[in-house]
Image (tube, helix red, strand yellow):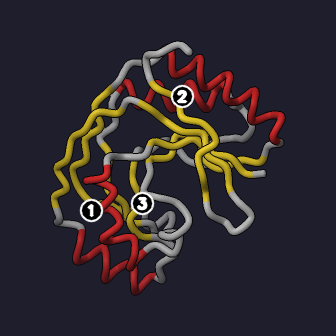
Amino acid sequence: MKFGVVIFPSKKLQDLVNSYRKRYDPHYALIPPHLTLKNAFEASEEDAVQFADKLRKIAGHHHVFSLKTSKISSFQPVNNVIYIKVDPTEALTELHTEINHELNVQKLEYSFVPHITIGQKLSNDEHSDVYGSLRMTKVNHEETVDRFHLLYQLENGSWTVYETFRLGRES
């Protein structure tokens, strides 16, 4: 079974992201807009119970923090992903680091670049056209993050919440 850990932004930011994703992201129908804290990984349901316990403790160690977006960027030439850049903060980076340390089930493929994907799996020409028209777009948005989620993937490829963890509260 596949699991992952994400932050879902506010409805306002999700609506903005989805205005792009429905055209440029084939995963649009599988998962809402999100900021990935732990990439998808394979684990059993028994493991998920232990992961949830660890994540509950981690959430208790971290305070609510501010999430700010600023611009549209791309991971090209590594891959043709277009995203809304989330400004890295100490609180966000520490949360990501602790989650990945505690749920040490895979090596990190890339360094942590906080982002919300708006387009992926684009051909080189599509990427060039779309990114060329969007890259000067300012996306100045700020909101408060008070929770993160452990997700699991269903047989149809969509993702759903296994458990939600509120920051700053030991349950």
Callout 1 secondary element: helix
Q: Residue at x 46, y 26 (%)?
A: 166
Work out how far the residue at label 1 is from the one at label 2, CA to CA, in angstroms: 28 Å
The location of residue 7, given as percent across then percent down, is 45, 42
| In this picture, residue 114 sits left or right of residue 69 | right
Residue 154, percent from left and from top: 70, 59
Q: Quadrant of residue 19?
A: bottom left
Residue 144 - label? none
How dense is the environment of label 1, judged by Cα within 10 Å: few (below 14), some, or many (20 and up)?
A: few
Q: Which mark is residue 117?
A: 3
Q: Residue at x 50, y 63 (%)?
A: 78
- Spatial CA span between label 3 and label 1: 12 Å
Q: Nearer the viewer, mark 1 or mark 2?
A: 1
- Does label 3 or label 1 sit earlier along the sequence? 1
- First-in-chain label (1 vs 2): 1
Please report contact status of discs 3 and 1: CB closer than 8 Å, yes or no.
Answer: no
Q: Residue 115: x, y in percent?
A: 39, 50
Measured as percent of width and height from the top left, residue 117 is found at 42, 60
Which quarter of the rendering shows the C terminus? top right
Residue labelled with disc 1? 16
Q: Residues within 10 Å of mark 3 (few under 14, many from 20)?
A: many
Does dot 3 land on a helix, a strand or a loop? strand
Side of 39 relative to 103 (left or right): left
Label 2 secondary element: helix
Q: Which residue is mark 2?
A: 97
Q: Could you tell whether 111 is left or right of 51 in the image?
A: left
Is residue 80 in view from this perspective?
no
- Label 2, label 3: how far apart the Cα atoms are: 20 Å
Tell which residue pokes out farthest to the bottom in this image: 125
